[in-house]
Image (cartoon, grey):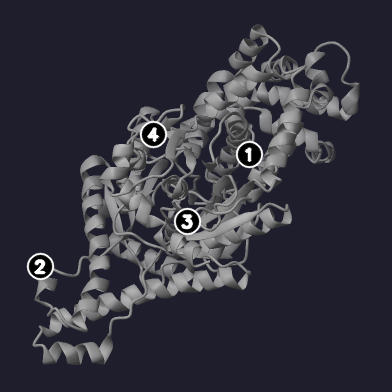
Amino acid sequence: MPEPIEALDRLLDRRVLVLTGKGGVGKSSVTAALAALAARRGKRVLACEVNANDRLPALLGAPPAGPSLAELRPNLWSVDVRPHEAMLEYAQMKLHLPAIVRAVFENRLMRYFLRAIPSLAEVVILGKILFHAREREGERPRFDLVLVDAPATGHALALLRVPEVVGAAVPPGALADDMRWMRALLEDPAQTAINLVSLPEEMPVNETFQLERALRDVGLPLGVCFLNGVWPHRFAPGELDQLPPRPPWTEVRAAVSHLEARADLALSEAGRLRRGTDLPVIELPYLFDAPFGPPAIERLSLLLEGKLGVAA
Amino acid sequence: MRPLLPGELPFASRRLQVCVGAGGVGKTTLAAAIALRAAVAGRKALVCTIDPARRLADSLGLPELGHDRRRVPVERFAAAGLEPRGELWAMMLDLKRSWDELIARHAPSVEQRDRIYANRFYRQLSSALAGSQEYIAVEKLYELSQTTDYDLIVLDTPPTAHALDFLDAPNRVVDFLDNDAARWLLTPALAAGKIGLGLFGRGGGRLFRGISELTGAETLRELADFMLSLSGMYEGFKERAGKVKKLLASPEAGFVLVTTPKPLTVGEALQFHGALEKSGLAVGAVIANRVHADIRAAGGDELARAGRSDGLPEDLVRRIDRALSDARALRHGDEEQLARLRRAGIEPFALMRRDRDVHDLGALWSLTEPLAAKGDAA
């Protein structure tokens, strides 16, 4: 198993990094922190979220980006990829009939119809993301790194499998061609890594195992596992027993025990995760003073940079 | 609405409770805890869960919690020191199977039913159509409310960040199944190669051909076939969806909105709450789950002095002080989010974070203790 630090360093050399995991584990935070880190190191970064109400710009302290690419800070762009807009964009790109396309797409019934086509939403969402990953600006790629704050487990799998599933189902043609290059890009470990985000708690760890297995089964290249919100252990076993059984120590002990119980749980779940996964695990601490929002993201991003060592 | 029994939760006066909220906030566990309170108080209660954690199913004594309703064994209660005056039942909602049952109910013949089952569009319906999982959950609630004699049914729902997925679902499903719409949309596919692109106009016909180039004409034909196979069922669906909608808005049903005191989930809960109120649906309770405990213990200089006078190692006292200040920061963050709910006119029920997961009925019982206390005080 490669050392986590090495793994993280090589990770940023990929073109596409996807982050997924159970709902509420901090996928958006890790995506935002990686985006800030890569941009600081001079990469041109596009951070994509999928129909998520502009979480990433909020985490990076910028105004909402919406469904069009917006530059949040030097080297860092963001976009909220929404199915309807992505579909419109895709149709316009392919069909070259902007006015009619818009008229039809804005029809309410047409919306239902489009929703009903299996996987079409996933096709256009993933299509837009990977389109930007291949986009060129003159001689060089428009973006060095495309980060994807993917949906939670099941939806992410559906999204990532779309080129394979749809590619097998459609007859030769424009769509089949698109599925082919999308699949090649996604399945190439030199260009893409699917990364898992987890928490040191029972259900998230279980879901990480399931997801890792499922991704392996379908042949998608895995990167690392970010273990978010790791609690510090501050006291040796029995150390708190020396507190006298009287005020203020009784109250102190009760309060501190809650934290220690949480730390115990985190430690045992982190251990279970390490034993059960083949991925390098990169731990990120729980940030007590600023667990959410832009300050937390900056901290996380600096911590990740620290884990990268001096390699530039 | 009906009078509460002693020990029942204050919002449980409505017979049907719908637990909603984002993923990972503890919705399923709370749904079970609400039903448990009612069962102990004397009701015949059913909790209908979506995807229960292994431990929750285990703690209900239902290792193979399936699509069928099962009664939680009385021994489980005794083991937790509880004496139920009523009954607790549990089931797991299998969304796919519920759709199948819905189709079977409305299909005029077995052949038509099987034709629908075999269609690729049908098989993807639940993921392709936003809100369809939410719809089938509520549809199940309707069915249970009509065909069973439970005093209380608590419905767990799929994680839903956007209330619209929930509230709009019956409309969407009905619109989707509307055959007139299908005919209008699919005439070109049905008439492929012949005439009949006129409905779209010339440009629209070109667009349709364009789309079929992208998706394959086969896909469109299959969709058309799916729509046709539903013909004759639309009225039944529509009537049913209307009843489902009416049920949600009736005095029998109430929503329990579950959130955690984190900025993102509280933001989503506020939107959800606003949408429910706007639609005239009753929100019986907003539960802020996993709130960190208040820290009253002394810190700083006071703690250092106490440490010195009790002869404790300076380093230990420093680490304790640091831990306490972190715990205070956690509490402070939660309080800010609770205040945010209150500013929006919502008085949340705050439930403390537990050191351990729910692993038996006793833990499930004590989870809602603060809610029950409020009920008795009222």
User: On the image, numbered disc 4 is attached to which residue?
Assistant: A215
Marks 2/4 same chain: yes
SS type, badge 1: loop
Marks 3/2 same chain: no
Please tell me which residue lies in front, A56 or A251.
A251
Q: Chain of mark 2?
A: A
Q: Are marks 3 and 2 in contact (CB under 8 Å)?
A: no
Q: Kindly indicate the quadrant of the structure image that contains residue A217.
A: top left
SS type, badge 2: loop
Circle nearer the N terminus (2, 4): 4
Per the model, the C-alpha gap separating discs 3 and 1 is 37 Å
Task: Judge the density around disc 2: few (<14), some (14-19), many (≥20) Cα neighbours within 10 Å.
Answer: few
The amino acid pointed to by label 3 is: Pro
User: Disc 2 vs disc 4: which is toward the camera?
Assistant: 2
Task: Judge the density around disc 3: few (<14), some (14-19), many (≥20) Cα neighbours within 10 Å.
Answer: some
The label number, if any, that marks residue A181 in the structure image: none
User: On the image, numbered disc 3 is attached to which residue?
Assistant: B6
Q: Kindly indicate the quadrant of the structure image that contains residue B202.
A: top right
Relative image position of residue B20 (x, y in whole percent): 55, 49
Q: Kindly indicate the quadrant of the structure image that contains residue B181.
A: top right
> Which residue appears at 73% of the width and 56% of the height?
B278
Left or right, A302 with respect to A49, comes to: left
